[in-house]
Structures are given as structure tokens and as C-alpha cells.
Amino acid sequence: MVTIKDIANRLGIAPSTVSKGLNDANDISPDLKKQVLDTAIEMGYVTKKMKKETRKRLCIFIENMLYEKPEDFGFDILLGFKQAAIRDNWEVHIVPMTPVLQMKEPYDRYMLRNQYHGGFLVGFALKDPWMKQLENTTIPTVLFDNYIKRNPNVAYIGTDSYEGIDLAIDHLHDLGHTHIALLNGSKDSMITANRYDAYISSMQNHNLDIEEDLIAYGYYVEESAKYHVTDLINHGATAIICGNDLLAIGAIKECLRQNIRVPEDVSIIGYDDIPTAETTTPSLTTIKQDRLDLGKNSYAALYWLIAKVPISRSLLRPQLIIRNSTGTTTLRGSKKN
Amino acid sequence: MVTIKDIANRLGIAPSTVSKGLNDANDISPDLKKQVLDTAIEMGYVTKKMKKETRKRLCIFIENMLYEKPEDFGFDILLGFKQAAIRDNWEVHIVPMTPVLQMKEPYDRYMLRNQYHGGFLVGFALKDPWMKQLENTTIPTVLFDNYIKRNPNVAYIGTDSYEGIDLAIDHLHDLGHTHIALLNGSKDSMITANRYDAYISSMQNHNLDIEEDLIAYGYYVEESAKYHVTDLINHGATAIICGNDLLAIGAIKECLRQNIRVPEDVSIIGYDDIPTAETTTPSLTTIKQDRLDLGKNSYAALYWLIAKVPISRSLLRPQLIIRNSTGTTTLRGSKKN
């Protein structure tokens, strides 16, 4: 166990000065305070306050994702996390985050200053300032849908994309589809890359040809679909698996605009099962991620990271929810074969 | 919640007969008893005894692996599991298993009859009778180093092979090796397939050529190494990554027998970090799987499966333990470049 004296020895200063730095005292220079905190973090020092059971605190940071209303994608993720954490008497804080706020203070300093035992980061982008810092953080941290190589303090939580895409292709294949397109999300995301790999692997396992013209990249928003749907259909697609439900809903709207019938002419599958997936017309067949379970599993991983069990990744099973946007192929499909 | 009445309705028999079947009474025919139990399992029925906190029981089944002495591979896995489970007041039974025993009674029946809430299966082979049954089991089950597709009641636990092999290739690459061989374990194992994929992917990421002659398959035992080591070295290998420590120890012995120096002529890396890895000569550089943590994480996954969170896979970080069986390349290596 690292003590204040160890930190003092490392820095060649008095233990009382280290105490001042850790307790945010006024009679110590900002530079020295920073140095004390940084060294304390590097050496894995745990403050007395952090040790007290009554002050057990975790923090959820969220950005690029709505979470305040029950229909928001993030709502159930946060709820699941809190439900599971409260049983173990954790206090959970929720902090909306931005790249600018991340620039202001390094992740480890923020966590130590606020006496958080662990963090759960939701909706972060690869280019966020804190993401780079996670490669070396000593704070137990769980990332939703992002992976950090080699750091035993950071775990990746998500849903198994391979099984999700495979369920979708299985369903379409059973319906007679052979020209199955992938309308993926933005290229700079780990999840996009996973779903591409999953698509290639599942198409091969189903003995279906992979055609470059049936793979497109958009963004994870509804408007993005219209730039790709026509192209995919012109290249022979009778079914389109979309990177998320928003893209799928955009694809359905674009089809309707062009008098292409869903699912009679083209089947559409989404990803996530957001609340609106059920109420759109036709209702959306989609690969469900259970967000409450994702939240619970994120807390579970954080709990074990705090207990020094180096979880690398923990993935949930997806579930295919079959609704009305998928059906058997019509003439188009058979003509193409 | 499924009740005795539900089971009775399904079977078209009296609830009292269902009770007799569930309680192993004597005045009910064996056939009907079997039918009651099978239907109860299928419908997810939980017996009163299972509900009582005082009878919370889990079962670890182990085969093909030693576990009774501290130096046995399975010892710490079972210990870690029990340590974590006991905190939550579980009673944990350990049952040595064989294919013949599995033939005698289906997995679900065995679990229900013995009132286990969940099972942890260690060392099972793909061809074991129970493995096929796991595709449809309703019992929360964790598998060490094996994966069952799509069943939300079964989770796979292990160490991340991709990161493990990548750490090894990184280390060898830093030492100047370019002709790195993979002496893998037996072909019918999921882990063998994962390590092959990991090897291909990491070699590509390091811009190293993949040569078919530098990839061999043996078995996960020491004797297996001698049939492959000479071939790999004759084909230019200056380093060999082995599927486990036993293979690596066998490879070192074979090198010594042929006056090939380790690591001056050839570097050898193992996988697992079994206790003897440290005491062999030269001591073995190896990719460590922390078995105590594997046990804890297996309990963690089972805990959440019982809570209906459908964990698909949960993997730990491996760690590269650098000892004396790896070093810089000598003439051989540079000649080959």
C-alpha cells in the first residue's frame, strides 16, 4: 500500500507538503500541488476519504448521447448501472462531458480530485482528449463501445456485434435473400469496424457472395440513409442491414419516397431497438441491445476492475426482434439470382 | 413466474402429480417423473428449495484438468471461483466429470435434480455430450475457454488471446525477430483457432510475412513439441510462440537435445505461466493467464447470468512475463533477413 511518506520520498519533499497537496491546501504552489497529485496517481495512492465505505463514489461521464428521458438511448444504460451499483452502496454521480471540459483537466486528476473509485464513460469518441489518457490510467474505468489496448484498468462493454449481424443475415437468408447490403455507420468508430467484420464473416458462413457495391458507410443519423439507399438497391440489394435504427428509419423513409415497398421490394433491418423502432411504419425488425442489461454489466465490470480483476471486454448477447420491415423477396430478388 | 399449475396444465395432469414428480416421490412412474422434470426445466420452473437463500448452490464440473494440488492448472481457477462465491453466501460443489457420466443423465436434469442454480464447466471438450446440450440449456452456465452460440444462459470466460499473442510478437519484434513461428495446440479446440487468428492479425500489424511453414499444430502436451521444433527451425524460425507452457518446455528440451541454444539461437515463448515455467532452464518467457482472476470472473459471469443479464463472453487481460527463454537474434536471424 502506497503511503504519503512514499510519495514524499519519491518527490524529495516533506510528508506534510504531500498532505497539503492531496488536501487541496492554499499554502502550496499550484505547480507543486499538481506534481503531488500526479505522483500520487502514478503510484496508485488511495486517499483516506476514498477508503471510507461511507464515501464510496463512482462517476458516469456521458457525451454525444441523450439520457434524460426514458425514450433516450442513454436513459436505461444509466438506470441499469445505478440499479446495480446501489445494491453495493455506491453513490453514483452523472457528469455530462465535452471535449473542452476534458482539455481543462486530465482524467486521472479529475477522478482523484473528486474522490471517485471508478468511472464509466458513455458515448465518447476516439478523438476525445480523455481517450488517449485511458491508455495509461490507473483508475478503474469502463468504456461503452470502445476498447483500449493493454491497460488492465480499463474494460470494454458492449453487445456482441458478430452474433447480432449473424442473427440478421440468418433471418434474411431464411427469407430467401441472397443480395444483402450493409449500410454501416461512420468509419471512425470501433463498432462500425466490428460490424463490417461480422458482416463479412457471416456472409461467408452463409455461402453468400460479398459484393463491394453492397457495402456503404454513412453516419449514425437518419438523414444519412438517403445518400446510399438508391445506390444499394440499384446494385441489386433486396435487403439492407443498417448500422443503427436511425439509419434504418431513414432508409425506410427514402424507400417510401421513391415508391419502393418495405418489405415487399426491400427488407430493412436496424440495430439497437430504440423505442421508436416499434412505432415506425412498417415497424422495424432490429438487432436489440438491452440497454438496462448493458448498464448492469458495466457496473459489474467496474466492480471487478476495482477488485483488481483485469477484465478486458465483457459482451452481452443481442436479440433479433422480428417485426414488419423484413419479408420474403419478390421478383427483384429472384431475378438477380 | 412458472407455477406447478402451469406445468400441470401443459401436461394435462393434476398439480399433485407434478409435485410428486418434482419431489422424486415413489408413487409415480419413472416415465412420468422424467416428463414432469423435463417440462419443468423447459418452462424455467424454480423449485421451492432453490428459492431458499439457505440452499443457494452452485456446481463446478471439471474434466481433463488437474486441480487438487496448488501447482495444478485448475487449482487456482476453482479457488478464485469459490473465494468470490462465498462472499455472496453460495455453497459450491466440485464434481469431477467424464463423458460416460454425461451420457448417463442430461445436464439440465442433473442440475435440477441436485438443485443447482448454476454451473461452471472447466476443461470440457467440444465433443463432450453435455456441450451439445448447452445450446438449449435453461440453466445459467459458465464455460471456461469454450463458446456456445446464441444461448443467453451460457457465457464464455477466458483470457484475450489476441492481446496475448500480440504482446508476444511485440516483444520478439522488439528483440529483432522477423521469422516468428507458431507452434499451436490441437486443431479441434476453439482456443487453438483463436490463437491462430491472433497470430495472423498481429504478424500483419507488425508488417511481418506470414509463412505457412512457420505454423504447426501439435497437442497441448510436452511430448508433442519434438515432432515440430526441428522443422520450424529448418524453415528459418528464430523464435517460436507455443500454444501452452508444456509445449514450450518440450520445445526447449528438444532444442537442448540438438545443441540449439535457447535463447541465443532460438527464442521460445509459452502460454499460461504454470508454476514450472519459472523453474525450467532457461526460465520461460510466457503469456500469463491469471487463474485466480479467471475463477473470480467466472463466478462474476455466473452471478449475472443468474440475474438474467445475458453475458456472452467476458475476457481477462493476459500479461507477458519476460524471463530467460527469449533474447536478441544471432547470425541465423540476420542471415534470413
Image (spheres, coloured by chain):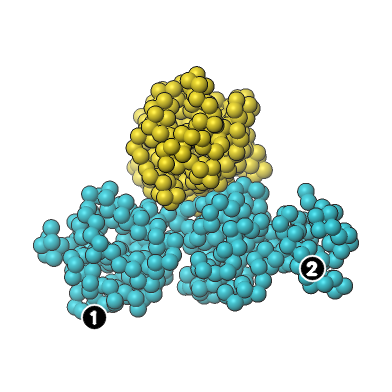
Chain colours: A cyan, B yellow
Question: Pointer 1 indicates a residue of which chain?
Answer: A
- The answer to whether A89 appears left or right of A98 in the picture is right
Chain letter for the residue marked with disc 2 in the picture: A
- Disc ID at residue B109: none
Closer to us: B25 or A78: A78
- Residue that mark 1 sits on: A257
In percent of the image, x 13 and y 61: which residue is there?
Answer: A336
A22 lies above or below A207: below
Amino acid marked by disc 1: Arg
Q: Position of residue B155 (x, y in %)?
A: 47, 45
Q: Position of residue B45 (x, y in %)?
A: 46, 44
The residue drawn where x is 38% and y is 45% is: B209
Taking depth in this image into account, of B13 and B3 the one nearest to the observer is B3
Q: Residues within 10 Å of mark 1 (few under 14, many from 20)?
A: few
User: Residue B7 location, x and y as percent?
Assistant: 40, 44
* Element at label 1: helix
Which residue is tagged 2?
A: A33
Amino acid tagged 2: Lys
Q: Position of residue B259 (x, y in %)?
A: 50, 21
Residue B328 falls in which quadrant of the image? top right
* Residue toward you, B244 or A219: B244
